Each structure stands twice: as C-alpha cells, then as structure tokens.
Image (cartoon, rainbow, N blue to C red):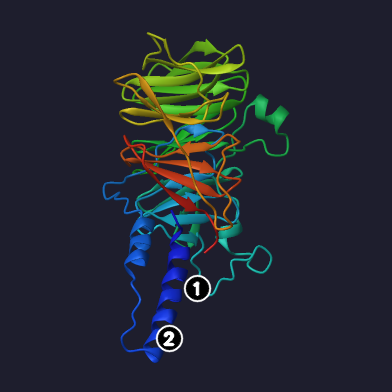
Amino acid sequence: MHSFKKAICIISSFIFITLCGCNQSKGDYVDLSNTEQKIKDSQLNINLDDFDYDDKPYNIMNLTTTVDSNYFYNFSIPNTKINLQSGRVQYVCQIPGCAHDEITSPGCISYQDIISPVAVSNGIYYIDGNKVMFFSGNDQTVILTNDYYTEYEAEIYPDNKSVITALVRHNNLLYIVCPTYYFTYNTDTKEITAPATISDSLCMGFCAADGYLYFTTENLELYIYKIESGKTEKIADKVGQVRAKNGYIYYVKYENEIPILYTAKADGSGSAKLLDDCYVNYYVTDNRIYYQSYVTKDCYQYDIKNKKSTKLDLKYTFSDGKEYINSEYLNIVSTSGMGFVFIINSTEKLIFIFEDNSTEYKTIEMEEE
C-alpha cells in the first residue's frame, strides 16, 4: 500500500496534467478513478470509539509504542504517529511553527526520550528517569517523583537509584515497575501505594491481571505475585516473556535454546505447551496469537480455538522498486479491544497492520511528514 503522502503527490500530479490538458484540448480529460482508489486504499479507518487505555504488559521489546483512540505512536526518535483514520504519518510535536529539528528545536517533543508510553483517553503517561510524566497535546506535567530504592538499586544503579523501568496499566491502576519492586498510582483518586518488593533481581517483564501480577527476571525466572496475600511463587525457569489474557497466562520458555510458548491458568496451574517455536515478541488477542518464528523469522497467526497456525505473507515494494524481505526480528503490538495488530520493522520503518482474525493487511511507511 502506498503511503498517504505519496497518494497526495499523485493527486497533485494529476491535477497539473488535467489543467494542462484543458489548455490544449476541450475534449481531453484525465481519468482519476485509479488515483481515487489509491487514496481509498491508503485510509486505515480504524475505529476506537470505546478506547480507554493501552494495556500492553511490560516487555523490553515494546518500550517505544502505544496507541490511543486517534493515533498509533512510535516513540523512536524522531517520534511519529499514524492517524488511525487517514493513515497519515505525522510528527508527535504539534507546536505551531516548530521546525521539528533535533538541534534547532530543543522544546520539540518529537526529539525527546519517551520511555514506556501508556496512552489513555486524554493523553499519554511515560517515564523520565525517576518521574512519571503525562503528555496531553503540547503540555507535559510531572505526575509523581520516585525517591524509593532498595539495596539492589543502590548497588547496581548508584547514580540513579530510584529509576523507574516501565509502566503498565490495568483497570484504574497504573503500575509503576522498578528494578525489584512496584507501586501503583490510581488514575481516578490520584492515590499512590507504598512500594512492594517482589524480586531480588531485575524484572524484565511484568503484567497485571485481576488479583495477580506476573513477572520475569534477568535470571529468566517466572513468578506469580498474589496481590491480596503479598506472596510470591515461582512458576517456571528459563522464561523470557509473560502475558495475561482472559483468565490465562502465556509465557515463552526456552528449551534447547529455542523459545517455546506455554499457557497456564491464571493461578499458574495447568501448564501446557502451545507453540514449538515462538519468539518473545508475540501478541495475544481474544481468539488469535500473533507471533514470529525464532528459527525462520516468519510471522504467523495462531487460531486458539482450532489450534492452527497460518503463515502471514509480508510483502511490500518500496518507492525505489526494492522488494521487502524480512531478515530480522519484528515488534508485534496492539491493545485490548482494538481489533488490529501492528507488526513493525523498525529498521525499514515499515508497519504491517492486520485486522484481527484476518490475514489481509495494510502497509505504512513510518517516514517523516
């Protein structure tokens, strides 16, 4: 699919040709039906009227993306966003007259580090060192400042002991994830809970479900934390990533250095192997799992009910005629209830957008506006 910007260029060219034709012959005209089809194809028309918040778990591969009711954001300098209706790619910064330049525009948010963004209906929460920030349009405000740390942070991060590593949203709570502990911020009441230590080593993954927290560590261990009792229980070893969905958890466990996807009930019981080759950048919807093969790097869509995988044939032709060939690991992201899944090649600045339950997709180049 051609980008929206390219479609606009095509329109301009046709208008110019049409005007020239009018001067040469009253009977000549230009058929714009093909151009109109290109414009139609470039529209995304993604409807998120019921959007509340982005609920992606903490995943070291998903620290730069988020989605709200209007845009898909890619916070990888320069920070850009895709209009979910038109497909137009824009800078995040909307300051009138801003040059969007890293050197000459020091106040431009398109060149600021936005870590672990979590979009909600009225803005975006993100991390700045030991602070949780909130971005609404053009304004950035400090929501809270963390000054807590344990002996682990003091030893490992002596110059930044109170660093916050990730944000995760579930219901009305924003989970502030730190290397070995977490605390919450209630987005309704503004109440902040006391920090609770859950690990003795760095948390590399984190997700929340009703009554439970799940996290993985730098030692590739998977734990379940029962919020009511405050008890932590180890579930598995050699685990790279965990997600929670519809009363189940999904986690990647390494066997002979190959990542295998397992599933279990919310309490950690009933563990079972699901997929034999699944890289850590998978995404789970109500009925499907979108994942990438660790061995071949091909992408698949797995039907949870029918237990069947379908290969996703990712194709794209760039403006210079080069054909897209996937040769690296991709980033797969979305948010609950959205109905669309984004598969991102950051190197090529290319995004394949799938409607859930379908193998058809649209393609966007994340080029500057």
Which mark's residue is nearer the viewer, 1 or 2?
2
Residue 227 visible within the image: no
Residue 339 in the figure: left or right of residue 227: left
Residue 355 visible within the image: yes
Q: Which one is in front, 179 or 61?
A: 61
Task: Identify which residue is drawn at 37% across, 66% down.
Answer: 35
Q: Which mark is residue 96?
A: 1
The answer to whether 326 is drawn above or below residue 14 in the figure is above
Q: Residues within 10 Å of mark 1 (few under 14, many from 20)?
A: few
Q: In which quadrant of the rendered view does residue 202 lie?
A: top right
Residue 182 in the figure: left or right of residue 37: right
Task: Identify which residue is drawn at 38% across, 9% down.
Answer: 269
Task: Identify which residue is drawn at 56% across, 59% down.
Answer: 110
Q: Position of residue 296 (x, y in %)?
A: 56, 26
Q: Which mark is residue 20?
A: 2
What amino acid is at disc 1? Answer: Pro
Q: Earlier in the sequence, mark 1 or mark 2?
A: 2
Q: Which one is in front, 245 or 276?
A: 276
